[in-house]
Amino acid sequence: MLRRFLIACLFGLAVLPALAVQPDEMLSDPALEARARALSAELRCMVCQNELIDDSDATLAKDLRILVRERLKAGDSDEAVKAFLVARYGDFILLKPPLELRTIVLWSAPFVLLILGAGGIYAFSRRQRTSKPEALSSAEQARIDEILKREG
């Protein structure tokens, strides 16, 4: 009984990646469909964020799948389709955005802030250790001695 259940689960898991792309979306030309699938593997669902448009059931992902296939049927190259989508949705639609100055700044900012924070803490603690308290004036020392005699 357990064995049959495990086999049924494995078959169920094998079907999961094909759930989002509906048969009515697929192209009749296998070469174009393969190109569409390859492009979809590079495109992010704008609703689900880190999910491929082929894996997402969101309405926008379906629209994007259809749009990709329409552009391919119209004769666009893979790069032209990606350029069209980037122009419309920005670099965020690409799972691997291009390496540009702003992406370098975005990814390196946490490390720079961490290093600056550690440097600030080090400088502050070093200043605390090297600074010595000022010596008390004779009037202040006399006042303390008087208080200590009275209190104690």
Image: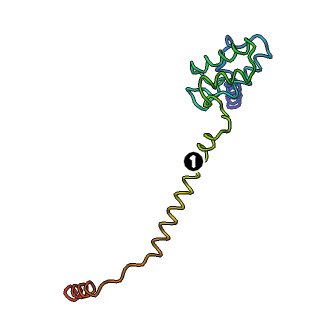
Q: Quadrant of residue 14?
A: top right
How many numbered dots are placed on residues in this image? 1
In the image, what residue occupies the spot 60% across and 44% down?
Answer: 105
Picture layout, residue 152 above or below residue 46: below
* Neighbour tally class for label 1: few under 14, some 14-19, many 20 plus, Cα within 10 Å: few
- From the viewer's perspective, is 51 left or right of 14? left
The residue positioned 69% from the left and 30% from the top of the image is 6
Q: Is residue 63 above or below residue 90?
A: above
Residue 82 located left or right of residue 134: right
- Closest to the observer, 72 or 45: 72
Q: Residue furthest left?
A: 150
* Left or right, 135 with reference to 105: left
Residue type at tag 1? Ala
Q: Quadrant of residue 140?
A: bottom left
Query: Quadrant where the C terminus lies?
Result: bottom left
**Looking at the picture, how far across and down is residue 109, in whole percent?**
57, 48
Label 1 residue SS: helix
Residue bearing the label numbered 1: 109
Q: Work out whether residue 112 or residue 96 is closer to the camera in this orientation and state it.
A: 112
Percent of width and height locating residue 52: 65, 27
Question: What is the x, y in percent for residue 136?
Answer: 32, 83
Among the 4 quarters of the image, the one containing residue 5 = top right
Task: Locate the N terminus and report the quarter of the image it occupies.
Answer: top right
Residue 142 horizontal/vertical position (percent): 24, 88
The residue drawn where x is 23% and y is 85% is 143
- Tell me: 39 left or right of 45: right
Residue extending furthest toward the right? 31
